[in-house]
Image (cartoon, rainbow, N blue to C red):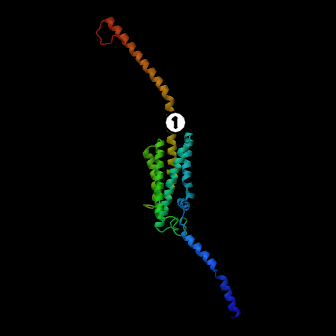
């Protein structure tokens, strides 16, 4: 055996793993195969990632602006209605993001280099995205119903604003798919512009006006009651005086008037 053959043999033996290392690698691979594909924490993280929470500032900003305008106009703000409006708009926004993820994947737009790879990397299944979107739309409807219950905003006005935003979030990629016909930016501008601002402002403004009206009624009711009682007593005493004078006139003149003789 020459020196060159000896050197080649040494290099091959150095590169090849030992028997114990091969056994350890095989055991680790088998253990990895036995581990479940994902825990509940990983599942929750996947759902949060699918919502794209970094885009929620587009929902919170118009809600804050609408509430600030209501506070400037009325000088009061209801924190509960502010939180309810924010949760309602965030639920619709998150559901719209899920609809966007689903339709972009189904149309083959998302790929390995896309920003949203929730379905491309199989982090979630398409049916999971659909169920989560339906759940968020339901949460938004429940929150909108709660806002209607505590506000004086008319049902038709609330339904027009809320379902207008909900329809826009779905039709951005679902149904007509405004995004695919170069109208997606227009839909986003309308939804996260006047609609969201109007929604938060209308809820706050009508509730403040309701509280002011109730305070006015509580303040004015005793005064009106006393005033009406005085008017009633004056009318009653005046009627009694007229009846007395008529009775005296009847007795003096002897006319047969049909007037009560006693009052």
Q: State which quadrant residue 20 falls in.
A: bottom right
Whether residue 32 can be seen here: yes
Count of marks overlaid on the render: 1
Q: Kindly identify the residue that appears in the image at 49 percent across and 26 percent down.
A: 222
Vertical position of residue 61 compared to residue 213: above or below: below
Q: Kindly identify the residue that appears in the image at 40 percent across and 17 percent down.
A: 236
Residue 67 x %, y %: 55, 46
For the view shown, which residue lies furthest in the bottom direction? 1
Q: Kindly identify the residue that appears in the image at 50 percent across and 38 percent down.
A: 209
Quickly name the residue at label 1: 212
For the view shown, which residue lies furthest in the left direction? 256
Residue 125 x %, y %: 48, 65
Q: Quadrant of the C terminus?
A: top left
Report helix, strand or loop for mark 1.
helix
Vertical position of residue 202 compared to residue 97: above or below: above
Pointer 1: residues within 10 angstroms few (<14), some, or many (20+)?
few
Residue 165 x %, y %: 47, 53
Residue 163 x %, y %: 45, 52
Vertical position of residue 233 compared to residue 185: above or below: above
Between 41 and 50, the one nearer to me in the picture: 41
Between 73 and 8, the one nearer to me in the picture: 8
Image side of residue 93 versus residue 10, left or right:
left
Q: Quadrant of the N terminus?
A: bottom right
Vertical position of residue 234 compared to residue 98: above or below: above
Whether residue 194 can be seen here: no
């Amino acid at each position: 055996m020459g020196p060159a053959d000896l050197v080649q043999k040494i290099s091959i033996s150095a590169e090849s793993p030992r028997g114990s290392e091969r056994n350890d690698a095989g055991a680790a691979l088998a253990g990895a195969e036995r581990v479940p594909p994902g825990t509940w924490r990983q599942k929750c993280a996947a759902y949060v990632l699918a919502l794209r929470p970094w885009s929620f500032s587009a929902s919170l900003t118009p809600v804050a602006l609408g509430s600030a305008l209501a506070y400037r106009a009325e000088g009061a703000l209801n924190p509960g209605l502010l939180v309810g409006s924010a949760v309602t708009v965030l639920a619709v926004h998150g559901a719209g993001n899920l609809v966007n993820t689903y339709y972009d994947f189904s149309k083959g737009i998302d790929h390995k280099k896309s920003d949203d790879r929730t379905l491309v990397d199989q982090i979630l299944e398409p049916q999971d995205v659909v169920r989560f979107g339906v759940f968020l739309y339901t949460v938004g409807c429940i929150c909108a119903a709660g806002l209607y219950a505590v506000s004086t905003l008319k049902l038709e006005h609330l339904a027009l604003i809320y379902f207008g935003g909900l329809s826009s979030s779905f039709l951005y990629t679902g149904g007509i798919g405004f995004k695919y016909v170069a109208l997606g930016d227009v839909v986003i501008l309308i939804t996260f512009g006047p609609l969201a601002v109007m929604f938060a402002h209308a809820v706050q403004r009508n509730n403040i006006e309701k509280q002011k009206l109730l305070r006015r009624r509580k303040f004015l009711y005793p005064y009106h009651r006393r005033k009406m009682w005085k008017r009633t007593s004056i009318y009653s005493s005046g009627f009694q005086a007229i009846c007395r004078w008529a009775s005296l006139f009847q007795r003096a003149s002897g006319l047969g008037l049909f007037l009560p003789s006693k009052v």
